[in-house]
Amino acid sequence: MSAQIDNVSVLKQASVYFDGKCVSHTIILENGVKKTLGVILPSTLTFNTGVAEIMDITSGICQVRQKDQALWTKYVAGDSFDIPGDSGFDIETIETVNYVCHYA
Amino acid sequence: MSAQIDNVSVLKQASVYFDGKCVSHTIILENGVKKTLGVILPSTLTFNTGVAEIMDITSGICQVRQKDQALWTKYVAGDSFDIPGDSGFDIETIETVNYVCHYA
């Protein structure tokens, strides 16, 4: 897993969610595809999706419960998980998570 | 002021300071120069500098007091200020600040 993403544009304005528990910066690849690069501090949060997402966990430890599911699944650096569109997930961040989010 | 910075590499790992009151991502320009892109949530914080820095405020409202100075100076979107090397500053963030930090 590379530590950086090359040849991108980055938006100067970050997005701040949940009083700063989640902060993300948007990047735009050469082909116009947008991704977000973010941090989630220790917390339990609920995110809703519009389009489907793939979350790459690049550092930290969390567990995630997909919407309407009972099961929590643990993810650490190097893991990824998918979230369907028009859905959501609960995430309990145990150690501060860095992530890259890809959109469908 | 452009809303984005083009042709950069971005590090996936953010830096988190002061329990998340400040979160920044490092970018590397084509010429190898590093800058950071960050957010400061409402707070009063003290930063120390190693090398000299230029802070471009891209959104929000803050006031800044240079190390060993009495005077606070207000900065808003579009403003910049310099901090000498081996020095520091207090920053009171009144409305969440986005910044780009350039290093000497």
Image (spheres, coloured by chain):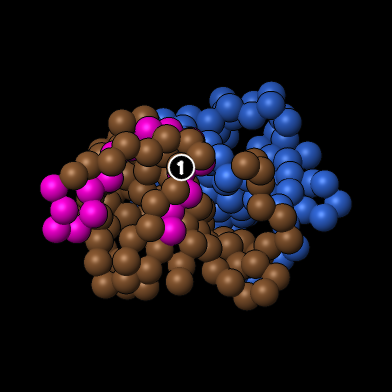
Chain colours: A blue, B brown
In the rendered image, residue A89, in percent from the top left (x then y), is placed at 55, 33
Magenta run includes residue B28: no
Kindly identify the residue that appears in the image at 53 percent across and 31 percent down.
Answer: A47
Residue at the right extreme?
Answer: A31
In the rendered image, residue B45, in percent from the top left (x then y), is placed at 23, 48
Kindly identify the residue that appears in the image at 72 percent across and 35 percent down.
Answer: A52
- The C terminus of chain B lies in which quarter of the figure? bottom left
In the rendered image, residue A35, in percent from the top left (x then y), is placed at 69, 47
Kindly identify the residue that appears in the image at 23 percent across and 48 percent down.
Answer: B65
- The N terminus of chain B lies in which quarter of the figure? top right
Q: Which residue is mark 1?
A: B79
In this picture, which residue range is highlighted in magenta?
Answer: B54-70
In the rendered image, residue B69, in percent from the top left (x then y), is placed at 16, 53
Q: Is residue B43 among what the camera can see?
A: yes
Kindly identify the residue that appears in the image at 67 percent across and 74 percent down.
Answer: B31
Majority secondary structure of the magenta segment?
strand
Q: Is residue A77 above or below residue B76?
A: below
Q: Is residue B45 above or below residue A1?
A: above
Magenta run includes residue B69: yes
Task: Using the image, name the chain to which the residue with label 1 belongs.
Answer: B
Q: Amino acid at mark 1?
A: Asp
Q: Is residue A63 among what the camera can see?
A: no
Residue at the bottom extreme?
Answer: B32
